[in-house]
Amino acid sequence: MTGSITVGGSAAVATEHLELLAGRLRRASAECHEIIVRLPPLRTGDSAARDIDLVDIENTVRRVRERLSDLAASLQAAIELYTQTERAAAAAVETVMAHLAATAGLVAARLGLMIVPALVNAAIAAAAVWAVLPPAMRDAASHGAAVALDEVVPVLSDARFVDTLRHALSLVDDAALGAIGVPPGLVAALGETGTQVSGIDSAALAVLGLAALAGSSGVDPVRVDRVGADRRRGEGQTTSAPPASLADRVGRVPDPATPIVVERYPLPDGTWHFEVYIAGTDSSAELGGDRPWDMASNVALVAEQNASSLQAVQAALLAAGATASSSVVFTGYSQGGAIATALAESGQWSTAGLVTVGAPTGGMPVQGDYPAVVIEHREDLVPVLSGIRRETNAVIVRGDALGSATAHETALPAHELERYAATAAAADAHGNAALQAAIASLPSLSTNGERMTFTAARIDRTER
């Protein structure tokens, strides 16, 4: 797993800085080697004293080179040891927490059987009291509830709360298994630190099944339409310059109204390279309605199912002329990031790169051999919805989006795309070697291409 990179903040152990130092030590050792190679030809025999001095210098430089090399190796070993220790400690804590969650689920289930009747009676009594309250008292109570909600909303963007929630969500399936009577020890063995039979994806799959029973399926088929595709009237001929950076790619992510943008660029061998930009969740979309960028598709993605929104991007790529051998870079925000990761890892395309921002992809590890950069804000609630991040080949960039005195107009300000664009720009300028290597490995294009925008809609059941 590539260690996380800090942008705009500090980490408990900033391994990226240690890696930079190790790299500098290796380069210094290499420079010493160059000096050693150049010294022997200078010993001409004309001056014995000078030749002796050159031998002394050569031996001194050789010792310095060896020490620098040893320091670099020791520092790299320390980094790897820290990383392994951190993973082992995290796995041990997860196992213990799985035991506790399963036990809590078991206790809660037993208590629930006893207290549910009382809670139902209390709810009925409260409803009766509310019905007879004077309008003025109802308005006052409603206002008080709204004020209390305003006080709670900022907590949703607190980095400590977000991190706690990330771990808590990973225990939901453990608590559920405990509630139905599975022994805590077996629950831990089945979970993420064991055989991985259960996890957030299992819980999401259960939710998806319940939603399907209710008629709100996130995996219903879709159709896509290209915006302005009437070539007879000269439409759909938008020219696009190649993306030049992470921030450039993030800045091209579209609005949910037209959730897919595909750019294609001609390559010297006559084939096409494709850049795909995928929008985040449509907050106004009806659950299971005709707009596939809804919460139903979100649940399907976390459950690792063929979500309607994912189907739409596949269809758009095919409509744009992409084939299984086409070079494709996927860029996505929020739900679009989950779609981008799933498609990049699907093996359906020749993935040339992946860039995601604010995406719930913790349970979707990147394992392919291509450059991948995952950007998250510590205060953003959305990325934690998939639980603790698993082993991945992606470079993880974590940044701070909010200042302590910042006034927020939305419930999740750290999830705003504009803030992620700013963090992407900071990542472009960051000096981490692994991050810069990933950015440099993304396709470098020199020719303008064609930009295509697509809308998507679920197919009505009566049309199938």
Image (tube, helix red, strand yellow):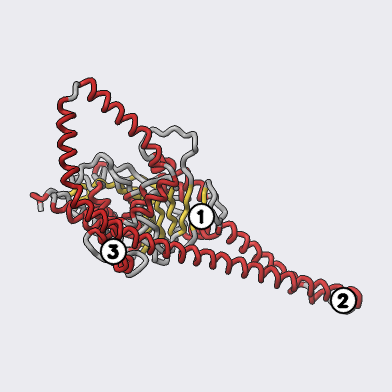
**Residue topped by disc 2:** 52
**Residue topped by disc 3:** 198
Q: Pick out the residue farthest to the left.
A: 462
Kind of residue sitting beneath label 1: Ile
**Residue topped by disc 1:** 5
In x, y percent, where is residue 306? 24, 58
Proximity of marks 1 and 3: CB atoms separated by less than 8 Å: no
Of badges 2 and 3, the one in the foreground is 3
Asked which quadrant contains residue 141, the reply is top left
Q: Secondary structure at mark 3?
A: loop
Q: Earlier in the sequence, mark 2 or mark 3?
A: 2
Q: Classify 10 Å Cα crowding around label 1: few (below 14), some (14-19), many (20 and above).
A: many
Instruction: Identify the residue at image location x=38%, y=52%.
Output: 166
Instruction: Identify the residue at image location x=48%, y=45%.
Output: 400
Instruction: Identify the residue at image location x=39%, y=66%.
Output: 368
Q: Pick out the residue farthest to the bottom.
A: 45
Q: Earlier in the sequence, mark 2 or mark 1?
A: 1
Nearer to me, 413 or 135: 135
Res 463 seen here? yes
**How far apart in space, not on screen, are marks 1 and 3 (Cα)?**
29 Å
Q: Secondary structure at mark 2?
A: helix
In x, y percent, where is residue 231? 26, 46
In x, y percent, where is residue 295? 25, 47
Proximity of marks 2 and 1: CB atoms separated by less than 8 Å: no
Looking at the image, residue 446 sits to the left or right of residue 288; the answer is right
Instruction: Identify the residue at image location x=18%, y=47%.
Output: 116
Q: How many marks?
A: 3
Of badges 1 and 3, the one in the foreground is 3
Q: Classify 10 Å Cα crowding around label 2: few (below 14), some (14-19), many (20 and above).
A: few
Nearer to me, 338 or 214: 214
Against 36, residue 270 (above or below) is above
Against 77, residue 128 (above or below) is above
